Amino acid sequence: MTQPLALVLYEKLLPGSQLVNRLQDLNYRVQTVSDPALLTQCAEQAKPLLIVADLESGANSILAALGGIKQNPATKHLPVIGFCKEDSAQLRTDAAKAGITLLVTEAAIMNHLPQLLQQALELE
């Protein structure tokens, strides 16, 4: 059986590289994207099972890119887990507008990744 593919968008080395390692430990193939402008194109070509994105780095461009994923007929079905260092009401509002499936903190994604993956996949 083929391993599921996770598309991971991040700019900061930590926690991005830690997340990639954790996903690989959970038997996911991982493709990383560092430029939000390439996210939709990568998602169309790679056909991932889900997208995980660090919202802290260049949040406006990342939220716009994730919104583009949800507006594209070929990728709108993809669950998106967004993570950030600290949660805020404004970020929650912006994330909801962009169509993010789950918004969690860095600590939560590192400590509860298997459960979050399951939850995101069940919601979609």
Image: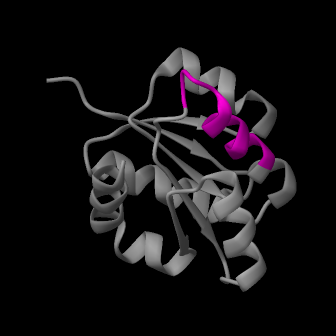
Q: Position of residue 74 (x, y in %)?
A: 54, 21
Q: Is residue 103 above or below residue 75?
A: below
Which stretch is magenta?
64-75
Q: Is residue 41 above or below residue 86?
A: above
Q: Position of residue 17 (x, y in %)?
A: 56, 54
Query: Main structural element of the magenta stretch: helix, strand or loop?
Result: helix
Q: Position of residue 86 (x, y in %)?
A: 67, 83
Drawn side of residue 21 relative to residue 119, left or right = right
Give me the residue at 80% from left, 46% from top: 64
Residue 5 falls in which quadrant of the image? top left
Give me the residue at 72% from left, 36% from top: 68
Give me the residue at 25% from left, 43% from top: 27
Q: Is residue 58 visible?
A: no
Q: Nearer the viewer, residue 54 or 101?
A: 101
Q: Nearer the viewer, residue 119 or 93?
A: 93
Q: Position of residue 124 (x, y in %)?
A: 36, 47
Residue farthest toward the top in the current orientation of the protein: 45
Q: Nearer the viewer, residue 97 or 5?
A: 97
Give me the residue at 26% from left, 51% from top: 26
Residue farthest toward the left in the current orientation of the protein: 1
Q: The N terminus appears in which quarter of the rendering? A: top left
